[in-house]
Image: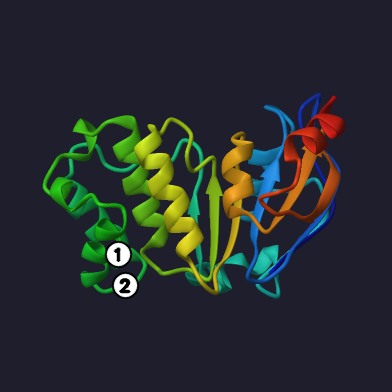
Amino acid sequence: MITIKNLYKNYKKIEALRGLSVTIPKGSVYGLLGPNGSGKTTTLGLITKILKPDTGSITILGKDIKEYYTVSDKIGALLQDTDLYVHRTVYDNLKYFAKLDHVSEGRVNEVLQMVKMESKKDAKYGTLSHGQKKLIQFCQAMLKDPELLILDEPTAGFDPKNILLMTNIISSFKGKTILLTSNHLDIVKKVCSHVAIINNGKIGYEGKINSKANLEKLYMKIVK
């Protein structure tokens, strides 16, 4: 689904990625782990073509990253610093993005039901709590019912109720490929089939994972 080879990305004198290579299999729930500043968010920015690599290659859904917009209708993304129009209602925001994505308006109610936010559809987006806003941002990512879903820290800032809601939603998906970043290793063990651990801009570990794995020990071994 996604193949990254020998990816480098610098911000002036800061080396964010230093030869990162990783393969995300089709149908996997793939956790990209690592300490703050390790390159996780940069990697997602490159995959979604928000950023441009210095060197290296990315293939996504069988297309070179330069052809990203030929497959973008099959990709949904929730990235850091995503925001919607604060003075519009939740419903109007999602209706607007549904139109941009050539999705029927009926899909708006479907995604709101998915995150149990139907009661907030007439609320101004700017009046919502941080956790509620993030759920609506997730709704936007889901409007196209994407084959590939990219989630940057999808449970960050959530209360326990919404963490459980999000993990249940992710676990319920069938046939989708999901790439997510997270610092919550217990959540990763619940939802992910594969993980890669980044340290200093490189992959230190890549492989399958299950709920019985000692992910904490493996993580600390890589990032120490």
The answer to whether marks 1 and 2 mark residues whose Cβ atoms lie closer than 8 Å is yes
Q: Secondary structure at mark 2?
A: loop
Examine the image and state in which quarter residue 181 appears: top right
Q: What residue is shown with label 1?
A: 98
Q: Residue at x 57, y 53 (%)?
A: 191
In the rendered image, the vertical position of residue 104 relative to residue 121, given as above or below: below
In this view, which residue lies farthest toward the front?
A: 212
Q: Is residue 50 visible?
A: no
Residue 133 is left or right of residue 42, and the answer is: left
As shown in the figure, which amino acid type bears the numbered disc 2?
A: Val
Give the quadrant of the N terminus.
bottom right
In the rendered image, the vertical position of residue 151 relative to residue 57, given as above or below: above
Residue 7 in percent (x, y) is at 82, 49
Q: Residues within 10 Å of mark 1 (few under 14, many from 20)?
A: many
Q: What colouring does the structure picture have?
A: rainbow
Residue 10 in percent (x, y) is at 78, 34
CA gap, disc 1 and disc 2: 5 Å
Give the quadrant of the C terminus.
top right
Q: What residue is shown with label 2?
A: 103
As shown in the figure, which amino acid type bears the numbered disc 1?
A: Ala
